[in-house]
């Protein structure tokens, strides 16, 4: 069966890839993959070790198996993004730059022969903004990628003026920027120690980081400085659906609010410029999100093959509009 991104009925924009060719590309920081004597897999990034997640022989690394599972799930086209464990936003810049180049070369090669089924977005060395801008341009112009993905936790806050150069390049190249958290402390400052229990850094910590990113982008004036910038956040913006009332009230009540957000409806208009994937694991949560922001900037996402991806029996075909939205976001 022939596939095309232009005609796909189901487009999944939230699917991470792990690349054998990028192993060791960050030097001593890894990444490195292996197994314990009992066969249990491990994955190392710097001093951080993830146990029990099998990458080798899974859709994360085996493209043929990924396509088979996509067919089983009814997914026509999928956007592959960096593994959030390997952002390397805090390691020395030379190692991060080397890793991102190797990663992007390998990911571009992975999708090049599967253009009807797979697309890709780039990893960027965010500790060096000029280098990140250069790598974004190379990824789009030379490698044919469709955008880039960064974390929420970086040396520069999302509203730092230093970030404006990257946002301007996204607008110039007419590509979206995806934002997806990583567990705090992998290669940067440690997060709340309470999040180290029960995998809470992933289970609920991501949702906190995502709503912080939304607030920073809106309150920090990023969308006013770059009105044509398209940013897509994972997991429906995290806990944004429950907190949007407080976020809006702050615009009316707090002294730091920028002038651009003070007119009636300005906050809602800025919020409506952001894009969100619908990967919330709960239909009622998704209904709440849609009731607040509508569905014009909503896209389908699964965290394909991840721990929180839909089970085969729970998966259902998303509304066709979400594929049309993805085509607009990805300029397909």
Image (cartoon, helix red, strand yellow):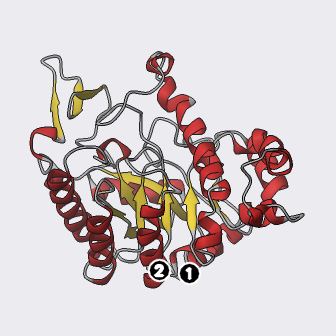
Q: In the depicted view, which residue is nearer to us: 273 or 284? A: 273
Outermost residue to the front: 255
Secondary-structure class at tag 2: loop
Q: Quadrant of residue 270?
A: bottom right
Between marks 2 and 1, how big is the CA–CA gap? 5 Å
Mark 1 crowd level (few <14, some 14–19, many ≥20, 10 Å Cα): some
Residue occupying image coordinates x 32% and y 36%: 188
Circle 1 — which element? loop
Q: Quadrant of the N terminus?
A: bottom left
* Residue that label 2 marks: 4
Q: Residues within 10 Å of mark 2 (few under 14, many from 20)?
A: some
Circles 2 and 1 in contact, beta carbons < 8 Å: yes
Q: Nearer the viewer, residue 24 or 247?
A: 247
Question: Can you give x and y, in whole percent of width and height, for residue 231 in the image?
Answer: 56, 64
Q: Nearer the viewer, residue 7 or 88?
A: 88
Q: Quadrant of residue 38?
A: top left
Report whether residue 315 is seen: no
Mark linked to residue 51: none
Q: Residue at x 49, y 32 (%)?
A: 202
Q: Which mark is residue 7?
A: 1
Reply above or below: 325 against 242. Answer: below
- x then y, percent, for residue 185: 35, 31
Q: Position of residue 144 (x, y in %)?
A: 32, 79
Q: Is residue 66 above or below residue 174?
A: above
Residue 134 appearing in the image? yes
Q: Residue at x 57, y 49 (%)?
A: 213
Q: Position of residue 298 (x, y in %)?
A: 67, 62
> In the shown orientation, is residue 178 left or right of residue 103?
right
């Amino acid at each position: 069966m022939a596939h095309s991104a232009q005609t796909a009925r189901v487009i999944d924009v939230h699917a991470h890839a792990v690349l054998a060719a990028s192993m060791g590309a960050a030097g001593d920081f890894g990444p490195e993959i292996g197994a314990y004597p009992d066969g249990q897999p491990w994955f190392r990034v710097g001093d951080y070790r993830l146990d029990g997640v099998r990458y080798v022989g899974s859709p994360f690394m085996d493209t043929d198996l990924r396509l088979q599972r996509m067919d089983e799930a009814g997914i026509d086209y999928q956007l592959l993004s960096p593994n959030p464990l390997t952002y390397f936003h805090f390691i020395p810049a030379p190692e991060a730059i080397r890793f991102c180049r190797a990663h992007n070369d390998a990911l571009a090669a992975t999708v090049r022969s599967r253009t009807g089924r797979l697309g890709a977005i780039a990893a960027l060395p965010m500790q060096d903004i000029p280098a990140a801008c250069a790598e974004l341009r190379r990824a789009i112009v030379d490698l044919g990628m469709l955008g880039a993905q960064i974390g929420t936790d970086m040396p520069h806050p999302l509203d730092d003026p230093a970030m404006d150069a990257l946002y301007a390049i996204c607008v110039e190249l007419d590509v979206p920027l995806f934002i997806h958290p990583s567990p705090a402390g992998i290669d940067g400052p440690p997060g709340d120690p309470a999040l180290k229990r029960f995998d809470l850094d992933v289970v609920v910590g991501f949702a906190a980081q995502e709503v912080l990113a939304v607030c920073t982008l809106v309150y920090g004036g990023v969308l006013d400085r770059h009105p044509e910038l398209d940013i897509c956040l994972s997991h429906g913006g995290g806990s944004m659906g429950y907190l949007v009332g407080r976020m809006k009230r702050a615009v009316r009540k707090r002294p730091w609010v920028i002038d651009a957000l003070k007119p009636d409806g300005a906050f809602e208009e800025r919020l409506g410029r952001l894009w969100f994937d619908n990967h919330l694991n709960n239909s009622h949560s998704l209904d709440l999100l849609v009731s607040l922001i509508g569905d014009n900037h909503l896209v389908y996402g699964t965290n394909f093959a991840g721990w929180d991806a839909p089970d085969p029996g729970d998966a259902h075909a998303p509304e066709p509009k979400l594929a049309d939205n993805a085509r607009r976001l990805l300029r397909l």
